[in-house]
Image: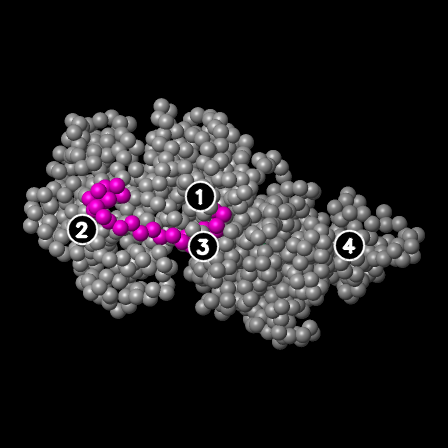
Amino acid sequence: MSFIADLHIHSKHSRACSRSLEPGSLHRWCQLKGIAVLGTGDLTHPAWSAELESTLVAAEPGLYRLRPELERAQDAKVPDSCRAPVRFLLEGEVSCIYKRDGRVRKVHHLVFTPSFAAAERIRARLGEIGNIRSDGRPILGLDSRDLLSIVRDADPEAYLVPAHAWTPHFAVFGSESGFDSLEECFGDLSREVFAIETGLSSDPPMNWRLSALDRVALISNSDAHSPEKLGREANLFDCELSYAGLFSAIRGRDPKRFLKTLEFFPEEGKYHADGHRKCRARLDPAETIRRGGLCPACGKPVTVGVLHRVEKLADRKKGKRPAGAADYESLIPLKEVLGQVLRVGPGSVKVDALYHRLLALFGPELRILREVPAAELEREGLPLLALALDRMRQGKVSLAAGYDGEYGVISLLGEDDFTRKAQLSLL
Amino acid sequence: MNGAELDASQRAAVLAEEGPVIVAAGPGTGKTRVFSHRVARLIRDRGAHPGEILALTFTRSAAAEMRGRVKALLPGARLDALWVETCHAAALRILREEAYPFPEPAVLGEAERASLLEGVVPAREAEALLDEIRAAKQRLEPPESAPGRLYQERLNSRRLLDFDDLFLCALRLFEERPEVLKRWRDRFRHVLMDEFQDTTLAQYRFASRLAGRDFFVVGDPDQSIYGFAGVPFDPFAAFAEDHPGCRVLPLTENYRSQAVILDAARQVIARNRARLPRQLRASLARGLPVEISGHQSDRQEAEMTVRRIEGLLGGASRFSVDTGWAARPGEGERIYSLADIAILYRLNAQARLFEKALERAGLPYTTFGKKTRKDGREVAAVEDLEDFRDGAPRPAGESVTLMTAHRAKGLEFAVVFLAGCEDGVLPYRRDGHPGAVEDERRLFYVAMTRAQDRLFLSYARQRFLFGKSLSLPPSPFISDIESELRRLQQAPRRKRPRGRQPELF
Ligand SMILES: [Zn+2]
Ligand SMILES: [Zn+2]
């Protein structure tokens, strides 16, 4: 049976992250979202690690679950329609800032370990190099290659995956402080890198344009800074439920076991197009080139987005799909869809009420987004929602791309849709 | 010798006729290169045997670097007999070879010195007494006071020397046994000495006993920062007196700092009496002005400095980039890495607030040195003498450097923050002591000239230091810099990032 895994989140110990990122609420939110396996986030953080060790117990090999009495307390707050087992996988992120070949490099990497002992070995090494206590995602002056070597030495099953590989400022292929290839970044160890995280602003077809990436798996995760954002990107597996099962499916790039990734529309990501946020200037790559990389409003350099960067490194036209590549689906978070349907903000009380009503009726968010038939929603008196989700599933959306840290806007419904369906109350 | 690698003033120094020579080497003028080329030239072009050369450096790390450079200039040459040593190491080597004053002379570690005073004076007086003993020995006087004599007796009975004894003993050996001195003088036909401005009387006497006609010293009186208050010893004056008719050759081109930084530094040092002619020129582009910022308190100074550092890193976290917390690089600015950046200060006590602020920002840092005395004098290079035995292992990753201005001597950083520029901190003034403003100005000058690209000076209106709250005016050294070269930053108010609360993503 297939299941969903979100392998990159943060805890309350990371900078600018919600206080409610703690084991109990993560367990509950995974059920509301429909996530079966969740990265713990922040495995390098001593206090978080200690909390995990005291609240989790071993489940399948390399996976953990909340202690039974804690599970029961949380499950009581989850609607029956959503209840399902939740597993945790030890994961963290490290921010490497260093100079290589005369240029400043700032690259984030995900680290996975099959055991607390392996995580402890990594913490011990990193703790000698820098400060791992003040931020769940520590900043270290460590070369990416050396981080990979530390991870590898900690455990043969500990892995490093470059995080949100295309974001401009903190990524292995980032336009501001990244590299042009995995080889350039990891040198003699580059073959040990078997996957990259594509990040919110890029989707698999964009990555397929680089033949150099044919040999790596493309994974997608939420990088959530609050529980509500869990699973906004994720991975769908049909493999043995274990640490080794998951990573063997990823490493093997086996489309029968690593089925697909669940994606944002890349235009919704904060760094899809080029632009300058202060001047509200959004540029497509061709325009950026025409303008010499400068903002039309203020003349300062624009932040070069992911699309531009992909085009720069691409050696293929659009459309080619490498053998073994996992499939993908593009989704929009349910609260955003509801905000559009109700014509209110996605954070509003109205949206929240409807969201929880839907969860109670149909099950977890990702099931609603991906599986619940439109007819069922219409039967519940939600024709506009049915229409919106139908369009999302078919990719019939209107897009205003994100740029320079500003999220993009994806519209599912037009003015016409509201006048036509105005007679139907949604409340 | 490939002269093309050297500029005209460097070439003149490297090729100078053998004899007593002072090379006046301003900051960033390539003195290490001149020194190493001079050694290489003696061996390759003047037929000197490597064993005839004694090259004295200030620190062990400088000796290691120098040895590497000479090797690189003389590929394939056998250099085992070449002495590239610190003064202390050279003195110890001689004493060991001569088995003087003990069959196997050994050196007592700095940390163990105090243990010799157990039961002699109360622990809190030990430091002052050890200073007194050191000061006496550096003037080549054995300790006079009763506790000082007891210290020396204990040392001798354990057949140990302290660092300062090395020179006393070597000089005594040379005096007692002239044939020994003659043998060493005959051996070292070429003596070179680096960082000459920080040479103590004892070191100078030791080196000049050994030196014959060819005595080549490199240094900059404006960068002399280890002088003992009250015991002025001017090695340049001593050298000139002992070697009438010696030549003074200046190195004139600064290759380290942007012109604005160098010009600002020259304006500051110009207020000091020149002991050698100053002929320093900038060879780099103009660069960005020196940024000066005043803050309400030392805490704010630390916070704002770290925030500025985040900006220079181009944002260290997604939070700081997405919220605009870290300003984007401005006009003509580029981004830097952790290892490019140093925060310098007068007193080690200033480090703590910067450490805390860096910790809050999650930025890695390394603090060098933990101790400044109450008289503000840096423990004269004792850490360097300590690494005479074994250097502490350095952490593997890059980090922001925190150190005193003293400790930064001989180093360079793309970006330098010089903090605590207040009248009373830099220049440091201790209660009851007017302070030697010229000494402090040299220290300020040394700190400024560590910077390659960017120099930031900051001061705080309120500072908590050594248990007291101080309200001090800005350092007078800041106003020595003409306004065209600097840019004043208004003390920014504490505020959160503008606009809406950053979204938790
Ligand atoms: Zn990240
Ligand atoms: Zn603009």
Q: Mark 1 lies on which chain?
A: B
> Along the horizontal axis of the image, is A404 left or right of A190?
right
Residue labelled with disc 4: A337
For the residues tagged 4 and 2, is the chain the same? no
Colour convention of the picture = one colour
Q: Of marks 2 and 1, which one's residue comes earlier in the chain?
A: 2
Cα gap from disc 4 to disc 2, whole angstroms: 86 Å
Q: Quadrant of residue B466?
A: top left
Is residue B285 positioned above or below B448 on the image? below
Nearer the observer, disc 2 or disc 3? Answer: 3
Q: Which residue does the image show at 41% across and 52% down from the upper left?
A: B254
> Label 3 belongs to which residue?
B283
Chain identifier of the residue bearing label 2 in the image: B
Using the image, name the chain to which the residue with label 3 belongs.
Answer: B
Residue at 50 percent of width and 67 percent of height: A184
Q: What residue type is labelled 1?
A: Ala
Q: Residue B265 carries which label?
A: 1
Disc 3 and disc 4: Cα gap in Å?
A: 62 Å
